[in-house]
Image (spheres, grey):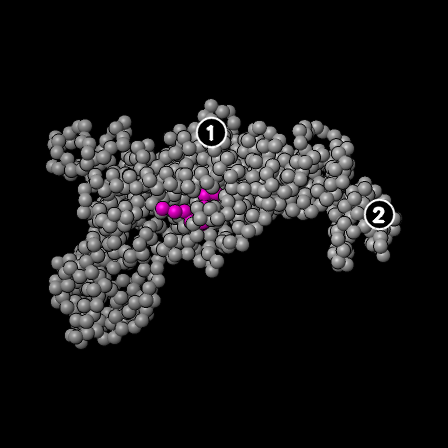
Amino acid sequence: MDKSYNKDIENKWQKYWDKYNIYRFDPKSKKKIFSIDVPPPYASAGHLHIGHALHYTQFEIIARFRRMQGYNVYFTPCFDDNGLPTEKYVEEKYNIDKSQISKKEFRELCLKESGKVEKEYADRVFKRLAHSYDWSLLYTTIDKNSQKISQWSFLDLHKKKLAYRSEEPTIWCTHHKTALAQAEIEDVKRQTKLNYIKFDNLTIATTRPELLSSCVGIFVHPDDKRYKKFIGKKIKVPLFNYEVKIMKDEKVDSEFGTGCVMVCTFGDTCDIEWWKKHKLELKVSVDEGGRLNEKAGKYKGLKLKEAREKILEDLDKGGLLVKQEDLEQNVGACWRCNTPVEFIVTKQWFINTLKYKKELINQGRKINWNPDFYRKRYEDWVNNLQWDWCISRQRFFGVPIPVWYCKKCGEVLLPDEKNLPIDPEISKPKKKCKCGSNEFVPEGDVFDTWMTSSMSPEIAVRFDKKLLPMSLRPQSHDIIRTWAFYTILKSYYHFKQIPWKDIAIGTFVLDSKGKGMSKSKKNAIWADEIMEKYDTDTLRYWVGSATFGSDLMFSENEMLAGRRFLTKLWNASKFSLMFLEKYKAKKVKLNKFDEYFLFKLDDVINKATKDYENYKIGDAKKLIDNYFWHYFCDNYLEIAKKKLYEGKDESAKYTLYKILVNILKLYAPIVPHITEEIYSNFSKKSIHISEWCDVENYDKKLEKIGDDALELISDVRKFKAKNNKSLKEPVFLTLDKNKFKDVLEEIKNVVNAEEIKDGEFNVEFVDG
């Protein structure tokens, strides 16, 4: 072995793993399969920060562990290049708007740029992180297979009457000019004004004066005595001079504002509810780009913020603005750009998500959630769903919705499954409409990206139903309402089964001030920069301390701790290998202290294995660390050193071999390069496809003997340190010889005792 561990070793083993296909899934194998539904990273970010690196490495550790356990691991690399993030990346890079060029040109740019970033990710990040993917299984969410499965899903749901098209109020992002689903809305706090406005002889309080031209009614509570005489009468809308009716509804909060509520089409979901319930007029005055339209009269063309200011100014001039109050409110905003959403009436495709809430909750309960409390978050989301899932998007780069509309009668025409994937703007129907017409209008919208990502299990396994359900879905907590929910929904709607047996919620990484990392906050620490400064195994050692479902703060001090660990493992192994050159392990009669250390090792193996199986990597690492530092380095190597140098004690050699090899295997999923390098001294077979640690079930009675002996050794060491003496300083030792009869020689060697007397514990220096 080299004098010290160095980064060249990483490159050496990465090339070896690639050359010999160490991580290739074997479809012909009869081994049990462990499959991972990998989260496809967006191929538009350019970099992965340390939080992403941790999340992806966390479940990669599980892949390595299961492979060593004897599973045939199905582990697919993938990239999410479908949809809005890629479009945004291309628009920003080329400083263009998608509406300025043709769909064909824009899509080609998206494919070109996402392909570049994917290659960078693969080489610069995932391979350097030693991720053990089977690269022959690579997929992207825009490739032909993904499009085919996504479109098949739509056809199947349409056949089952779970997909439908409707013209109705839609959640709309005016920045991206597209419809959104409920799951894509984030609540954001904002400071605003509650404006008290005169409507003839009533005063209305509203935060949305810019929607006055969309006012279709005034509501009061039926029991509010102040307004009973007004119910059923009409009132004039200020500035716009048309009349609306005053009505009653129990949902009005009499305590908020003046107790009179202006209903506009549409300011919020309550407006939509009242509009439907009371069959009100439709007056939409906001266009798709967030500007007022012709219904707003002289305010036409103004952006909403500009319109609000101008309308308030005119109300004030006319003596119609009674007063204003500061108000903090939560508003729904697009989760991509934080623009507050609007509600406009459009024709969209939907999937019925409200029909089977009870069944979807039951499906969630069949899955093993790690940690378990995240199942409650899933159930809360299902219970609180109010909208069906809007799956159509007014974007360019995505999976086309495979639909044509008859020009004559408006009938929906769908392709045959055998012809998928298709782009309806390029392909034409193979048959006439039932009305006899052969003229069709192609659907120009694309699917919501989750429409495809919700089929990730089927996409990953190439629709091989023998591989379903998959074993594990690792993902972050913020997309339980989208990715987890939609995947569970699709699996139930299509196959009446769960998509995976386990779901593990990844660790969320915080910066040194406790804030979540992101490019926009300018607090991201990039994974490739850390690997350049330190090395991959140092970073992975830090990842190994994370607990699924919990937050973890990043500090460079943790990198220094990782580096110290690698140095210690290297040096301890190098020392051990001095005595194990060409050693062939064979069972020998063990002395009691050697048996004790192997008993302790078995205990760690059993507990750490269970922790790995339950996705408690951090707990497993704590156990392994404690054994490595305390039992192996601090004690066993010191206890066995004299016998090892003498070279006659086969018990010590066997024990040293067993401990070192099993420590390497326990750490191998976390730090793959250093363990591979050291293990190569014992075997030509990669440690990562070697058998997992074995246990031999040593006598539990040994635990008390060994624990007491280590405590005694620790007391002698403390005595020497307290007296500023070297640990090698010779001593006279008095102890209960009968109690320690099986380990007297080892105690004598490790504390450097000139003589051991029988009696009550005592330590004296030889020189007095």
Query: In the image, is residue 676 part of the stretch drawn in magenta?
Result: no
Indicate yes or no whether the magenta region holds residue 50. Answer: yes
| In the image: residue 350, left or right of residue 505 | left
Q: Earlier in the sequence, mark 1 or mark 2?
A: 1
Q: Quadrant of residue 392?
A: top left
Q: Residue at x 24, y 72 (%)?
A: 196
Q: CA distance from mark 1 to mark 2?
A: 56 Å
- Residue 610 locus on image (x, y percent): 59, 40
Query: Which residue is identified by label 2?
Result: 754
**Quarter-of-image position of residue 286:** bottom left
Report the magenta residues as a range.
Answer: 46-57
From the viewer's perspective, tell me whether residue 667 is left or right of residue 368. right
- Name the amino acid type tagged 2: Glu
Q: Which residue is mark 1?
A: 19
Find numbered disc 1 in the image and state the secondary structure of the residue it sits on: helix
Residue appearing at x 81%, y 50% in the figure: 730
> Position of 634 compared to 620: left or right?
right
- Quick one: 289 or 117, which is closer to the camera? 117
**Quadrant including the C terminus:** bottom right
Q: Specify whether residue 360 is in view.
A: no
Q: In front here: 509 or 273? A: 509
Q: Residues within 10 Å of mark 1 (few under 14, many from 20)?
A: few
Neighbours of disc 2 within 10 Å: few (<14), some (14-19), many (20+): some
- Reply above or below: 101 against 15: below
